[in-house]
Image: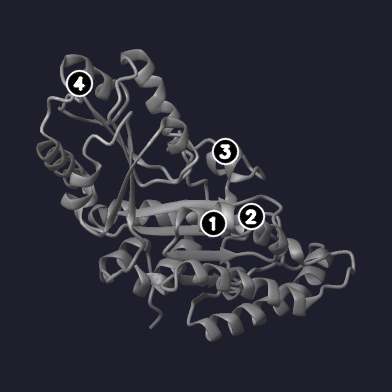
Amino acid sequence: MRIRYSISILLAAMPAALFASSSVDVLCIADKNHCTAELQAELGNDFSVRTVTLEEAMTSLPDIIVTMKDFGEEENYWVIKRLRTIPSHPDIFICGEGAKYAALASRAWTDVIPFAFDGSADTQEMARGIKKTLIANGWGNIPRKRIVFAGDSITDGAWGKGDSKPASKRDHYDFNHIYGHGYAEKIASALLEKYPGRNYRFYNRGIGGGKLQGLSDRWEEEVLGVKPDIISILIGVNDAPVNGTRVDFEQWEATYRSLLDRALAQNPRCRFVLCTPFSASRGEGFSNESHLKRKESTDRFDAIVKAIASDYGAVLVDFSALIDNLIETDKSGDHNYWVWDGVHPTMQGHNKMAELWIRKAKKLL
């Protein structure tokens, strides 16, 4: 009997995993170290607390920002909006007393910690109050699990309203578009909806038209910069030529392996989900010349990805076999039903990819 899977069924059976991560970076924006030492002592070794200026915060990738400086009500609102554009998507908390801070928190979709920083407050009490607010807002389950999706346009899905743009040029403020529209978004939404207590953080770092070398060039800044615990990679279709150009498969493999080595150098406990690239046939009666040329290379890339996954103990997600099977067994009568242009899946195709990814990667989650 054939077993049918859905995202909801897979999530219901998915166990919680023990996870080791880097420390949680807490930035306190202030003119002086109001209670940094006390807050560090209250939070413990899972957190790293430091006082910074606004400009220093903007050039960091923190997990939490606590504003201890009164910029003025209207200015403070725009400061918080600016902080929300930081690519690591930090949680932001305002420290201050009175009705104006309550109103500001409401306008800025954030939380207020009721303390005045005029030198009269007890620093130990302040630290305990900040800790209480942070823990109440989901930071009690430490560490958070940071999951990055790296790849080309199949991963990109126009995340951050900017297909083919680098992460620094995307919109990190609008959370309706932060994950893009595709398998990465479907995975993130399914896991976030089902497990709000697991503190998942997802980052889409796909870029339309991307090739492996381009991913390598932006690896440290865009992928490792968010301190990932899990990195999912789907790359290769744009490296597969349709014009007869020769591919250096040995160099491609060496570059791919270097990505994992660089990630492990930063975080030896980083785990990987490696996905096979694919090229889809349009079926009988349609021109498949480009597909056949592209598939000569993607088949070689698939073999390389499988070997690397085995060598590094990574989770392998065989998207190529999935797409081939969907097309071979298709009953819709529509040659564009699962992949609409030979490369890019339709929404139902992305949904099948998300189901497979969750099923294969659940032991890491």
What percent of the width, then of the height, locates residue 178?
Answer: 47, 42
Q: Amino acid under label 4? A: Ala
What percent of the width, then of the height, locates residue 30?
Answer: 32, 30
Q: How much space separates mark 2 and mark 4, taking CA atoms?
A: 40 Å
Q: Amino acid under label 2? A: Arg
Sooner in the amino-acid sequence: mark 2 or mark 1: 2
Residue 223: mark: 1
Q: How much space separates mark 1 and mark 4, taking CA atoms?
A: 36 Å
Residue at image location 18% in from the left, 45% down from the top: 38
Q: Which residue is mark 2?
A: 218
The N terminus is located in which quarter?
Answer: bottom left
Drawn side of residue 240 relative to residue 226, left or right: right
Sooner in the amino-acid sequence: mark 2 or mark 4: 4
Q: How much space separates mark 2 and mark 1, taking CA atoms?
A: 7 Å
Residue at image location 15% in from the left, 27% down from the top: 115
Sooner in the amino-acid sequence: mark 1 or mark 4: 4
**Mark 2 in CB contact with mark 1 (< 8 angstroms):** yes
Q: Residues within 10 Å of mark 2 (few under 14, many from 20)?
A: some
Q: Which residue is mark 3?
A: 170
Q: Secondary structure at mark 3?
A: loop
Q: Amino acid under label 3? A: Arg
Answer with the quarter of the image where residue 306 lies.
Answer: bottom right
Q: Nearer the viewer, residue 107 or 36?
A: 36
Q: Is residue 348 visible?
A: no
Q: Secondary structure at mark 4?
A: helix
Q: Residues within 10 Å of mark 3 (few under 14, many from 20)?
A: some
Drawn side of residue 74 relative to residue 197, left or right: right
Q: Which residue is mark 4?
A: 102
The answer to whether 174 is drawn above or below residue 245 in the figure is above
